Amino acid sequence: MKRFIQFIIDFLRSGFSGGILFWAWMLFLSFFIMLWGYGEFVQIRDGMIVTGLNDQVSWGFYLANFVFMVGVAAAAVTVVFPAYVYKHHELHRIVVLGEMLAIAAVVMCLLFVTAHMGRPDRLWHIFPVIGIFNWPHAMLTWDVIVLTGYLALNIIGGFYFLYKKYADTELNKTFYLSVVYIAIVWALSIHTVTAFLINTMPARPMWFHSMMPIKFITTAFAAGPSLIIIVFLLVRRFTPLKIADEAFHALSQIIVWCLGIALFLTLSEIVTELYPSTEHSLGLQYLMFGHHGLNTLVPFFWTAMALMIGGFILLLIPKVRKNLLVLPFICLAVFIGIYIEKGMGLMLPGVTPTPIGEFAEYTPSNIEFMVVGGIWAIGFFVLTVLIKGAIGVILGDVRYTESESRTVQGEQTKAATT
Amino acid sequence: MSKQETKVKDANGATRRDFLRKAGTYTAASLSGAAMLLSDPKPAKATANVSWAEHFQKNYRLMTDEEKEEAIERLEKRYSEEFGKKVKVGSEPAIEGVLFGYALNIQKCIGCRRCVKACVAENNQSRGEKQQIEWIRVLRMEKGKFSAEDRDVHGYPEDYGIQVGGNAYKPAGVVLEGQHYYEPDQVPEKDAFYLPMQCMQCEKPPCVKVCPVRTTYRDPDGIVVIDYNWCIGCRMCIGACPYWARRFNWGEPDLPAEEMNPDTHYLGNRPRMKGVVEKCTFCVQRTRKGRWTGCVEVCPVGARKLGNLLDPESDVRKVLASKKVFRLRADLNTYPKFFYFMD
């Protein structure tokens, strides 16, 4: 137990150590985190009226970000799956970094949902036993289960691995691998259920199609690895941890295929909806072409399409894909493209027009920008600390040594090993 | 609408830079997350008086009779203090053998919206500048007027292989193509008819199914009710409702004390708080005591009928037996107990 507490302390110490650049980065993030605090404070004080949401558009920026981040969380599996199932050696070394990313992403998801709630003070109402958990009827309760489960699996899997490495003891392979394999399947479930959350409502025809889960998963497995590649390249640049080129090649290949399928699904959706052009396609038409001058979303949609298609074509070329100087920029483009398409580009046309056919445009308020920006900052803050700590352990800089209260026995074993 | 207007005012009143500067000064104070939840620095009157016990009460449906009594006593005390008059919070349960149904004669409706006003007065909705909540929306439907001038002589371009004259494209009484912002000098207008919409009290309500905390449920008399004290404000129900019947309290409701209706029901028209969903309950505070709903009572042309679907002698059953009846969006299998009919 004492060793475990020591592990937490050493892990955090490693996570919070760094040069001027590190502290500048953390200070930069803290600024946005403070804005989040202010935004949440105002929203809780005055109610959701401080947001840009209204009767017509009652789901907006918060849920858009939530849906997108669930995908990023699930995408940790693109590191874990090849590492364990295909025994990809290079990915295997850094698999724990993927798990750290998943933890940070799920934390963001939970914060986005809380921001979306009208009564966050009553959050306990949804907890089983003390509240009422409308399971299995309400899709949201399924989402709660899969998200918290996924968070738990990643914390257990990731930190069990790190702790064993830290303590320099043997991994219990059966236990560890079962956690890993369950987490792989579980990752798919979190995004599937999030898709079910919105596509099981015939009142919202744009979402009401069975392609939603697979589209969610493919876009997630394009956007997620894009972020992972950028993070890994930064890790390689700023820390002594060596990540082999093959790891990037494997990930960029996953992006190409998933992005290709995602684009294909988008095309299928557009043809299916626009060919007959029923009233049910009004949401998609509003997104793509606007509606009698209400066309805020139009440039966003086409930008997203350009970024995704452009990224896909570039990544198809092996020479470009394998060029690690160009790759992060393509990844950034893909990431932003999917963020638009699957975030606001999915949320807003889903609720526009309203069930009686009313169109209303929605722009997030400053408070919403503060809260969302702040939650992203919190995500990066957590991610930075977790990754720095994990790298410290992987490299062996952070490992268990008997400290002040070391026993004679401890010294003897230490002497014996050296 | 009025909410959007307020938004515009905000945007004009303060520039972004001002806003960020103001934000900077507040940030330090706002860091203590937990504390800010508990210590409300600018409490609205309604929030200030909420007792701890009310924060931690159970879901209404699961309360024992004593717990219900306690909860109601608490609320009556709070409301009476807040509004300066004796407020009664009823707890009448569903009456055995009653299943409420509603029938609306769209041929008679003149679009005067007296039902909307009566509903707001009866059910203590938020009103005023900032947030105006109405449970009934009266849609104005265009009557079909096809004329030779509107005719697009070219029709569709030949390439498409479809030859239509471009005349019947105009909306004409198509269900769900109306709008509810009409402001005529007088009603009824010559070129329109009207279709009021409110909660349909579905037998298979999608809103109830998606509620993660079961704060909204169907009572045995077929009325879908909400425990406002249990609602977490996730708005899943708003997304799931095909009739756009549910309203959200975006801010603290604005209910002037002198206009407040003190005869309330726990699951009905008692004053709500910010961040919770509300909707039509067929005036549960009246109907469970054998009275008409506010809208039925006020309708000047008798277009609205309420009754017990299980009683063959009730108004609704007579309508169902003798008139041509339809329900909205029957394809969704929600089985509304709100019927439309024509003479």
Image: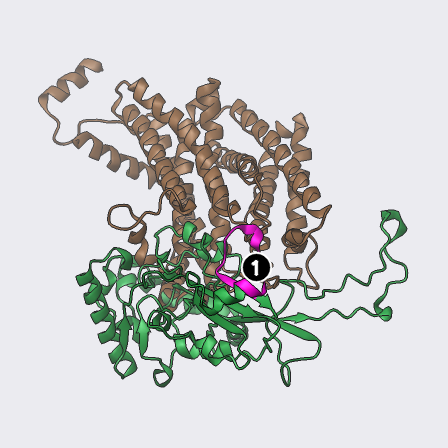
Please name whichever residue, A133 or A303, is drawn nearer the observer in this view of the structure.
A133
Say whether residue B20 is magenta. Answer: no
Please name whichever residue, B177 or A26, is drawn nearer the observer in this view of the structure.
B177
Whether A327 is drawn above or below B295: the answer is above
Disc 1 secondary structure class: loop
On the image, which quarter does residue A44 sit in? bottom left
Identified at 46% across, 30% down, the residue is: A77
Query: Circle 1 sits on which residue?
Result: B328
Q: Bounds of the magenta span?
A: B321-340
From where the camera sits, is residue A86 visible?
yes
Q: Position of residue B329 (x, y in %)?
A: 57, 56
Q: Is residue B176 left or right of residue B292?
A: right
Please name whichever residue, A268 or B260, is drawn nearer the observer in this view of the structure.
B260
Dot 1 crowding, Cα within 10 Å, few <14, some 14–19, many 20+: some
Q: Is residue B304 left or right of residue A358?
A: left
Q: Which image quarter is the N terminus of chain A in?
A: top left
On the image, which quarter does residue A416 sit in? top left
Q: Position of residue A25 (x, y in %)?
A: 43, 47
Chain in green in the render: B
On the image, which quarter does residue B309 sit in? bottom left
Q: Position of residue B262 (x, y in %)?
A: 31, 79
Identified at 54% across, 49% down, the residue is: A343
From where the camera sits, is residue A373 visible?
no
Say whether residue B336 is magenta. Answer: yes
Q: Which image quarter is the C terminus of chain A in?
A: top left
Q: How is the image coloured?
A: by chain
